[in-house]
Structure formats: C-alpha cells, structure tokens
Image: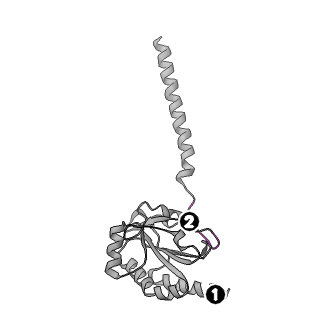
Amino acid sequence: MATEKTKATKKSRGQKRAGTARGAAKARPTARKRKVVLAPGDRAPVFALPDQSGAVHDLARHAGRKVLVYFYPKADTPGCTTQSCSVRDARRTFAKQGVDVIGISPDGPSAQAKFDMKYELGFPLLADESHAVAEAYGVWSEKSMYGRKYMGIVRSAFLIDEQGRIATAWYGVSPKDTVPEALAALAGLKSV
C-alpha cells in the first residue's frame, strides 16, 4: 500500500512539473509582448487619466480637434522642463491652428500640479502612474543609465487628427525638437 502511495505521489509530482513546464512555455510569448509602434493612420489609443488638479481628462474631450500628446519621463527635470516650456510658449500658435496640447508622464497629480505651477504651463498634464497609456502608445520601454537598466518613458510626441487617428508620431524626440517637429507636421497637413 505504501508503494501505491509513493507511485501516486511521484506521478502527481511529475504531472506538476510537466504542467509547470507547459505553463512556462505558454507564458513566454506573452512575456515578450510585441512593442507597439503607432504609425500615421492608426487609431490613437483612448485614455482617461487624472490631470494636475485630480480631474479625469480623456481623449474623447478633444473629438473634432487636433491634439498634440507628448510623453515625458519626469516632471521638473531639465529635459522635461525644456520640452514643456517650449510647448507652453507655442500654445497660442497651436490654438490658432486648432490644436489642443496634453502632456503625460508617470508622475502623480501632485507632482504634475507643482510642475504646472512652477512653470505656469497652463495645459493638461496627465498622471499615467500605471504607465498603461504609455504602453498603449509604445513609449514605455527598457532604458539604461550609467549601466543600470530600468523601465521608463521614451520621450515621444503624437499629433492626432480630428478623427482620432495618428497624423504623425515622433518616438525618441528631443526636448527642443517637439514643437518645431509638430509645427512642421501641421504645415504639411495644410498643404495636403
């Protein structure tokens, strides 16, 4: 009787191992998600995130208007400040062309509020603390600094048209080039 129990135990252990191996094999493809890369004509991923005042701000609010959505790694850092102040300084130009502006980072609403107040940005800064929106736009990626690897935002910008489609996407855009690139793209859209 003891031998039957031992055989049953060995069999169940073998089944568990086989199940684990099969489960691990199945998990590998999902662990290696295909990186999202949005291109002109793609539907812009929708989002609803808290802004710097804590109010939920969603992309649907901008239906029928162009929207410049830019992602920055961290509020009140040199590159992000350069980028955001550049967008702030061009806000009237964007408004004249029917373009709304939205900044998104993984910072919480209070950090976004401090950043907005300090530089008087005056446009929605959204808190993507779970980085779900960043992932949907393909800007959450492995980065490296001083030999240390970590996950973070790849500075990027997207011009979304009135129908909610990507007009232009800039992955890895430099802080100083966000506004000139967007304005050039808008000029190109007018000539088409």
Pick the front one: 151 or 135: 135
Residue in the picture at 56% in, 44% down: 25
- Residue 71 picture location, percent across and down: 46, 72
Q: Magenta segment, which residues?
A: 34-42
Q: Amino acid at mark 1?
A: Lys
Quarter occupied by the C terminus: bottom right
* Relative image position of residue 82 (x, y in whole percent): 40, 82
**Circles 1 and 2: CB distance less than 8 Å?**
no
Q: Residue furthest right?
A: 192
Q: Quadrant of residue 160?
A: bottom right
Task: Name the secondary structure under disc 2.
Answer: loop
Residue at mark 1 to residue at mark 2: CA–CA distance: 24 Å
Which quarter of the figure has residue 79?
bottom left
41 vs 60, nearest the viewer = 60
- Residue 39 counted in the magenta span: yes
Picture coordinates of residue 85, whole percent (x, y):
40, 83
Q: Looking at the image, which residue is at 43% across and 87% down?
A: 89
Q: Is residue 38 above or below residue 13?
A: below
Question: Mark 2 — residue?
Answer: 45
The circle on residue 190 is: 1
- Residue type highlighted by circle 2: Pro
> Circle 1 sits in a helix, a strand or a loop, which is it?
helix
Q: Residue at 40% x, 80% y: name it.
A: 122
Q: Is 144 within the magenta? A: no
| Res 77 seen here | no
- Earlier sequence position, callout 1 versus callout 2: 2
Q: Is residue 6 visible?
A: yes
